[in-house]
C-alpha cells in the first residue's frame, strides 16, 4: 500500500471513496499543451459539461503527478487529461492511486492504462471514473456537433453575398456562445 508521513497524518493513504456521485466530486482537469481554438473549446466544453452535471468543484493545478497524488490521498475525487502527460508524469501517480484503492485507466474507460498514450483518467472509484468518462464523452460529442454545424453554416454561406456572410457569422457566434 501507499503510505504518507506528515505532521498532520501518518498511515496508509486512501482515496475519498465518494462512489459514483458526481454531485459530491471534486474533479481535477487540465487543458494540456494544446492551444489551438479546438483544444481550448474542448477544454471549456468539458468543464461546462462537468458543471452541468453538478460536480462539487473543478480544480486546475497544472501537474499530472500532483493531480494523481491528490486523488490517491482523497483530496479530490477524480482527474482526467488527454494528449498531454508523459510517461514520467503519470506512471508514478497511477501506482499511488491504485495502491490507495482508486481506479486508473484510459479516458475511454478501458484498462490497463496505456503508458504510451499520453492520456489518463483516474478516480476514487471505478464507478466515478466511468461517470467521468461518460461526461467527457458527452462534452466531446456536443463540441463535435457544434463544430459540424458551424462548418455547414459557413460552407452554406454565399461567398459573394455580404448578407449571407454576416448571417453565418451571427449564427457562428450564437452557436459558440452556447458552449
Image: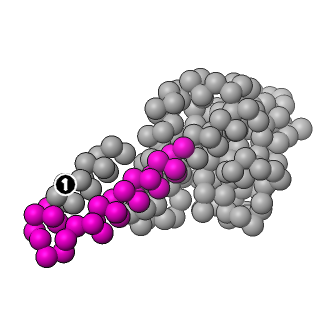
Q: Position of residue 5 (x, y in %)?
A: 78, 35
Tell me the residue at 68%/27% (across/down).
Answer: 20
Residue under circle 1? 170
Give SS at disc 1: helix
Can the viewer see residue 63 in this picture?
yes
For the N terminus, which image quadrant? Answer: top right
Q: Position of residue 36 (x, y in %)?
A: 41, 66
Q: Position of residue 32 (x, y in %)?
A: 53, 59
- State whether the magenta stretch is mostly helix, strand or loop: helix
- Stretch in magenta: 138-166
Tell me the residue at 78%/30% (across/down).
Answer: 14
Say few, some or many: other residues with alpha carbon within 10 Å of mark 1 (under 14 / 14 to 19 / 20 or more): few
- 29 falls in the magenta region: no
- 165 falls in the magenta region: yes
**In the image, is residue 9 above or below residue 48?**
above
Q: Position of residue 94 (x, y in %)?
A: 77, 49
Tell me the residue at 16%/58% (across/down).
Answer: 167
Taking 91 as reference, is 37 left or right?
Answer: left
Can the viewer see residue 73 in this picture?
no
Displayed quadrant of residue 162: bottom left
For the C terminus, which image quadrant? Answer: top left
Amino acid at each position: 500500500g501507499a503510505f504518507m508521513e506528515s505532521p498532520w497524518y501518518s498511515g496508509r493513504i486512501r482515496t475519498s471513496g465518494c462512489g459514483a456521485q458526481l454531485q459530491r466530486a471534486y474533479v481535477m482537469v487540465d487543458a494540456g499543451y494544446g492551444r489551438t481554438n479546438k483544444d481550448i473549446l474542448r477544454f471549456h466544453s468539458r468543464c461546462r459539461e462537468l458543471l452541468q452535471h453538478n460536480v462539487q468543484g473543478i480544480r486546475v493545478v497544472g501537474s499530472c503527478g500532483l493531480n494523481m497524488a491528490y486523488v490517491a490521498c482523497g483530496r479530490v475525487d477524480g482527474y482526467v487529461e488527454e494528449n498531454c502527460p508523459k510517461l514520467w508524469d503519470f506512471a508514478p501517480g497511477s501506482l499511488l492511486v491504485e495502491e490507495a484503492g482508486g481506479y486508473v485507466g484510459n479516458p475511454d474507460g478501458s484498462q490497463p492504462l496505456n503508458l504510451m498514450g499520453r492520456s489518463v483518467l483516474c478516480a476514487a472509484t471505478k464507478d466515478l471514473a466511468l461517470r467521468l468518462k461518460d461526461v467527457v464523452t458527452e462534452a466531446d460529442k456536443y463540441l463535435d456537433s457544434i463544430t459540424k454545424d458551424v462548418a455547414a453554416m459557413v460552407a452554406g454561406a454565399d461567398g459573394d453575398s455580404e448578407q449571407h456572410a454576416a448571417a453565418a457569422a451571427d449564427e457562428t457566434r450564437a452557436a459558440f456562445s452556447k458552449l
